Image: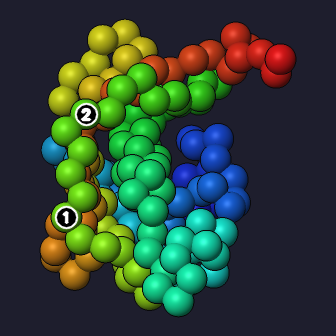
């Protein structure tokens, strides 16, 4: 699945759509990619002369990849973080890197999803985390 099809599932749009492509295998494991071009807004001040993808952005890239596992349950709903645990940052990610994300759902309780994910660059682990997402019906979200 490429970016345009990903947009049918995720509510994110540029510049916050952070998944370029995803494949979901027979075991329901997502294999996603995001290429860091170097032009991203989050690199402009992090850090001048030595741009590094912020850890929170790495978590967001993994989160979007995880949510694509939810599939059709996302239609008409928005996924929100409900928790993040056991986050470990192992290696910096820089412009020119292609981040490869692996994610799987460990458990589901109604519209709450418990997932685990990790991201690698050149087969070296950069970050890993356990995440929880709650799906909220779009008609229940207010713009107050």
As drawn, 117 above or below 108: below
Q: Secondary structure at mark 1?
A: loop
Residue 30 rendering spot, x and y as whole percentages? 29, 51
- Around disc 2, counting alpha carbons within 10 Å, would you say few (fewer than 14), some (14 to 19), or many (20 or more)? few
Residue 131 rendering spot, x and y as whole percentages? 31, 34
Q: Is residue 4 visible?
A: yes
Kindly identify which numbered label has been placed on residue 90.
1
- Around disc 1, counting alpha carbons within 10 Å, would you say few (fewer than 14), some (14 to 19), or many (20 or more)? few
Residue 12 rendering spot, x and y as whole percentages? 64, 47
For residue 66, side relative to residue 54 (left or right): left
Residue 11 rendering spot, x and y as whole percentages? 64, 41
Kindly identify which numbered label has been placed on residue 22.
none
Q: Which residue is mark 2?
A: 85
As drawn, 7 above or below 93: above
Sequence-wise first label, 1 or 2: 2
Residue visible at 19% across and 64% down in the picture: 90
Q: Could you say which quadrant of the image residue 126 lies in?
A: bottom left
For residue 80, side relative to residue 82 (left or right): right
Marks 2 and 1: in contact by CB < 8 Å?
Answer: no
Q: Residue furthest front?
A: 48
Quadrant of the snapshot with the C terminus: top right
Scheme by which the image is coloured: rainbow
Q: Nearer the viewer, residue 18 or 129?
A: 129
Q: Nearer the viewer, residue 144 or 48?
A: 48
As drawn, 32 above or below 64: below
Residue visible at 24% across and 45% down in the picture: 87
């Amino acid at each position: 699945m490429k970016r345009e099809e990903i947009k049918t599932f995720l509510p994110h749009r540029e510049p916050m759509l952070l998944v370029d492509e995803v494949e979901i295998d027979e075991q329901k494991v997502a294999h996603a990619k995001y290429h860091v071009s170097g032009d991203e807004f989050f690199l402009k001040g992090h850090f001048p002369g030595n741009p590094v993808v912020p850890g929170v952005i790495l978590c967001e890239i993994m989160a979007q990849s995880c949510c694509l596992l939810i599939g059709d349950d996302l239609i008409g709903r928005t996924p929100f973080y409900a928790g993040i645990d056991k986050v470990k940052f192992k290696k910096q990610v820089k412009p020119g890197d292609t981040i490869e994300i692996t994610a799987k759902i460990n458990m589901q309780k109604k519209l709450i999803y418990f997932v685990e994910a990790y991201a690698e660059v050149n087969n070296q682990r950069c970050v890993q985390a356990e995440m929880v997402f709650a799906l909220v019906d779009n008609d229940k979200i207010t713009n107050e």
